């Protein structure tokens, strides 16, 4: 009988002894034992209550162009029909100079001048002995493409040697690396999506190209671009934007460029778009009884929130004295707000209500604002955001240097729904390199129930999150409905509002406002293309009343509010939900600074804290994909500061936050390493735990951690995100956020375990948050 290399997770000495006895050719770590076993042995181990992980059996074919793959093991299927690599390559060879350009690249590889990308599949987790064997050959695994499969660059002489390694299951050349261009080809309109102005038939076409920085110069790329009739019109350290004449075959051009050894990724450039008072109680900032201060005393004082949006009415009283900078990026020396979007967003985050006697306030009225105006012009009805830089690092770094540690972005790119594109990778890279910066993105307003492929009739379809909100390290925010039943179109039915997008009940009969247990129909749903949970959290996004720009016309809003001199107006969208979460992040950050003494709490800690306190919504549309947290509709639930932070009206509620940083405070360096923490628990409050980490950039989780909660006398541990799917409870291999929620815990001692299933790029920092009726200390056991 043939044997498989399996992994047995071990939680106590008895588990380890059983695994050692049952398996052959074993390798042991703190977290697991891996070895060979036949099907009978596997069944026996599982019958004894051990948690067994089999090798990955489905390996998708990835390419830098080809999106002709399954979305994943959920059976969702490919979102759109895509061109195959063969079709694209055939089209590429019809271009002038194509054969010469490709032959030159091939010659550089064969003569050892450059390395070419390969997919390398190993058996099981990336053990230290595997890493060492590859390092001896001068080979580094660069990116995890999917479970057990990695991208690496080899020269011609290395191929045979690597293929012969005992632990290497497969080695195949990777002629292409991202499926984003395949998505566009599948839409049958790549030329339109690559246009600078989609409504203009004669406009230029653009590709974005990311270089491999191991090459000192870009001469080969620039030479190929010129021979193909293109021009590099913008460039950063790693990225180029290339213009081609109207009518150019972008699919074939990209197929040529992506075959160059010096190129990482290629995708069409598509301009990003906007994601166009009652909110405070809905997110847990409840009104205090007369004569008492608020139960939650934090207001964001000492925090700087950066916002990149259309512009700001800096004369609005709600921001007076709290603007550290207003930077004009889209128009020369002009950061005003004729669109109204940016001022409204800023008001939701940190407006102090000065123009309304405190009636209409944002979430963090004590915070300071750093504003980046990215609006440039309105063209053919579209508000253009041409102030966004080529590389998003250039957007975030000035805000970071100015002291901002929270950055809100209520915009995205609807051309690449659910996809991890170059911009998403840029955001992940920035947060990974600057772990104290929490970046918040709205999920998008692309929710539709028309011709739904992955949901029941009358429910909003999945796979509509807009990048960069698909990034792993951002906090992605969807929109729940406001409790407001009048004003801002709150009483309108979604089916009347947009009958083409919501033609069938129940969603067509639901009103825009009035039911905060439900979601806004327009709110983009997850998952991402690699099955990660998005959005992470939701917040009110319909009939939101906030600051109005004096420079924006009435047509820009969902309604006006006249009680306070025209200083406020209604808007709706995930754009309005995201800044509330950014404001809440400021309160949480202030809490950690002032109460826990953390001078620089990490983005992962703030993210884990907000998600840990999220309240799972019970509306029928909020639970369409799964009736337990997390799901693809609301993520981990709705923002709820009442359940997030300790306060006087919730006696006995305790919060512990662990920030395992790179400086030696618990960061994990090796596959199989374990960190354990002990807490004492009393009855009376739910026990909640959340693990989050800022993962290295790359599609899918690169460093995979696991959360488990153990209690003596219980046969099995609770594991992170075990309720994310309806039919199975297993370890999560997709997400860099994991939760355990025990609604009615028994009193006793619990152990919280963080283990490393796979570490590609060490060390990996993490944040662990626990709340409930727990003891005053949390003890580190390892």
Image (cartoon, rainbow, N blue to C red):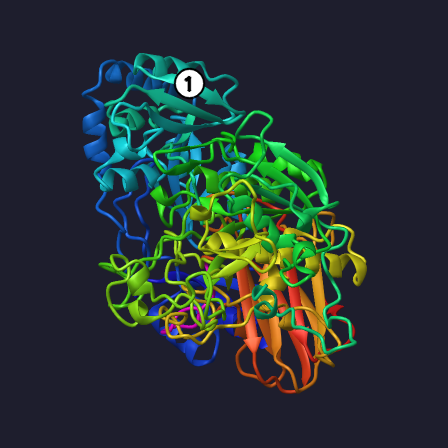
Element marked by disc 1 = strand
Residue at image point 59% right, 55% down? 348
List x then y, in percent, for residue 647.
73, 73
- Examine the structure image and report whether residue 725 is included in the region drawn in magenta: yes
Q: Is residue 167 left or right of residue 409?
A: left
Number of callouts in the render? 1
Along the viewing direction, whichever of 105 and 172 lies nearer the viewer: 105
Residue interval drawn in magenta: 722-733
**Magenta: main secondary structure:** loop
In reply to whether residue 509 is colored magenta, the answer given is no
Seen in the picture, residue 121 relative to 359 is either above or below; the reply is above
* Residue 42: quarter of image: bottom left
* Rendered view: 501 above or below 616: above
Name the one closer to the observer, 130 or 532.
532
The residue beneath circle 1 is 232
Q: Quadrant of residue 674?
A: bottom right
In the rendered image, residue 306, in percent from the top left (x then y), is placed at: 63, 44
The answer to which image quadrant residue 421 occupies is top left
| x and y percentages locating residue 197 in the rendered image | 34, 30
Reply above or below: 176 against 595. Answer: above
Residue 693 appearing in the image: no
Foreground residue among 729 and 137: 729
Residue 413 appears in the picture as rendered:
yes
Left or right: residue 398 compared with residue 55: right
Q: Position of residue 367 (x, y in %)?
A: 71, 51
Query: Where is the C terminus found, in terms of image quarters?
Result: bottom right
């Amino acid at each position: 009988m043939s044997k498989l290399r399996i992994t047995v997770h071990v939680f106590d000495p008895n588990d380890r002894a059983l695994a050692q006895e049952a398996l052959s050719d074993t390798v042991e770590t703190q977290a697991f034992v891996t070895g060979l076993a036949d099907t009978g042995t596997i069944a026996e181990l599982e019958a004894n209550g051990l948690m067994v992980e089999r090798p990955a059996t489905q390996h998708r074919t990835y390419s830098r162009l080809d999106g002709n793959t399954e979305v994943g093991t959920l059976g969702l299927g490919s979102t759109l029909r895509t061109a195959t690599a063969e079709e694209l390559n055939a089209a590429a060879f019809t271009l002038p100079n194509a054969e010469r350009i490709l032959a030159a690249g091939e010659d550089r590889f064969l003569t050892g001048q450059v390395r070419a990308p390969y997919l390398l599949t190993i058996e099981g987790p990336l053990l230290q002995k595997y890493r060492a064997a590859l390092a001896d050959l001068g080979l580094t695994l660069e990116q995890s493409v999917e479970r057990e499969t990695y991208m690496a660059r080899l020269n011609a002489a290395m191929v045979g040697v690597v293929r012969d390694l005992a632990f290497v299951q497969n080695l195949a050349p990777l002629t292409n690396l991202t499926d984003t261009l395949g998505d566009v080809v599948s839409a049958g309109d790549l030329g339109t999506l690559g246009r600078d102005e989609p409504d203009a038939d004669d406009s230029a076409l653009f590709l974005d190209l990311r270089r491999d920085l191991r090459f000192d110069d870009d001469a080969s790329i620039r030479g190929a671009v010129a021979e193909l009739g293109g021009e590099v019109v913008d460039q950063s350290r790693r990225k180029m934007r290339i213009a081609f004449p109207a009518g150019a075959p972008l699919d074939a051009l990209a197929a040529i460029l992506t075959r160059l050894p010096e190129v990482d990724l290629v995708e069409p450039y598509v301009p990003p778009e906007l994601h166009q008072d009652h909110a405070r109680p809905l997110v847990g900032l409840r009104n205090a009884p007369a004569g008492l201060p608020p139960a939650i005393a934090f207001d964001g004082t000492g925090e700087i929130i950066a916002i990149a949006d259309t512009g700001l009415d800096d004369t609005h009283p709600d921001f007076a004295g709290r603007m550290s900078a207003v930077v004009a990026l889209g128009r020369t020396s002009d950061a005003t707000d004729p669109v109204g979007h940016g001022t409204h967003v800023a008001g939701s985050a940190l407006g102090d209500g000065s123009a309304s006697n405190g009636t209409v306030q944002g979430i963090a009225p004590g915070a300071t604002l750093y504003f980046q105006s990215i609006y440039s012009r309105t063209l053919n009805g579209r508000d253009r955001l041409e102030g966004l830089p080529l590389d998003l690092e250039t957007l975030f770094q000035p805000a970071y240097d100015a002291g901002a540690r929270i950055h809100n972005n209520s915009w995205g790119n609807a051309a690449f729904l659910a996809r991890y594109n170059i911009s998403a990778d840029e955001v992940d890279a920035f947060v990974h390199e600057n772990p104290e910066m929490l970046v918040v993105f709205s999920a998008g307003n692309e929710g539709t129930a028309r011709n739904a492929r992955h949901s029941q009739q009358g429910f909003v379809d999945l796979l509509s999150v807009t990048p960069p909100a698909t990034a792993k390290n951002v906090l992605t925010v969807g929109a729940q409905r406001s409790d407001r039943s009048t004003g801002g179109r709150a009483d309108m039915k979604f089916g009347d509002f947009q009958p083409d997008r919501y033609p069938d009940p129940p969603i067509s009969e639901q009103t825009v406002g009035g039911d905060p247990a439900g979601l806004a129909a327009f709110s983009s749903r997850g998952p991402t293309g690699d099955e990660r949970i998005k959005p992470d959290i939701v917040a009110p996004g319909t009939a939101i009343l906030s600051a109005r720009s004096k420079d924006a016309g009435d047509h820009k809003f969902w309604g006006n509010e006249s009680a306070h001199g025209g200083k406020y107006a209604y808007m709706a969208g995930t754009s309005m939900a995201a800044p509330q979460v950014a404001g809440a992040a400021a309160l949480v950050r202030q809490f950690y600074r002032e109460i826990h003494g953390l001078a620089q709490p990490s983005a992962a800690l703030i993210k884990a804290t907000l998600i840990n306190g999220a309240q799972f919504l019970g509306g029928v549309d909020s639970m369409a994909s799964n009736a337990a947290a997390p799901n693809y509709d609301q993520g981990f639930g709705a923002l709820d500061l009442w359940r997030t932070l300790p306060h006087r009206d919730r006696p006995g509620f305790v919060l512990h936050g662990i920030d395992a940083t790179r400086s030696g405070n618990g960061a994990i360096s090796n596959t199989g390493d374990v960190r354990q923490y002990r807490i004492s628990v009393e009855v009376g409050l739910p026990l909640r735990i959340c693990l989050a980490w800022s993962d290295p950039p790359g599609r899918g989780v690169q460093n995979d951690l696991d959360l488990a909660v153990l209690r003596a006398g219980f046969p099995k541990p609770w594991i992170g995100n075990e309720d994310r799917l309806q039919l199975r409870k297993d370890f999560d291999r997709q997400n860099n956020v994991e939760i355990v929620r025990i609604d009615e815990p028994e009193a006793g001692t619990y152990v919280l375990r963080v283990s490393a299933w796979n570490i590609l790029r060490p060390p990996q920092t993490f944040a662990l948050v626990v709340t409930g009726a727990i003891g005053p200390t949390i003890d580190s056991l390892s």
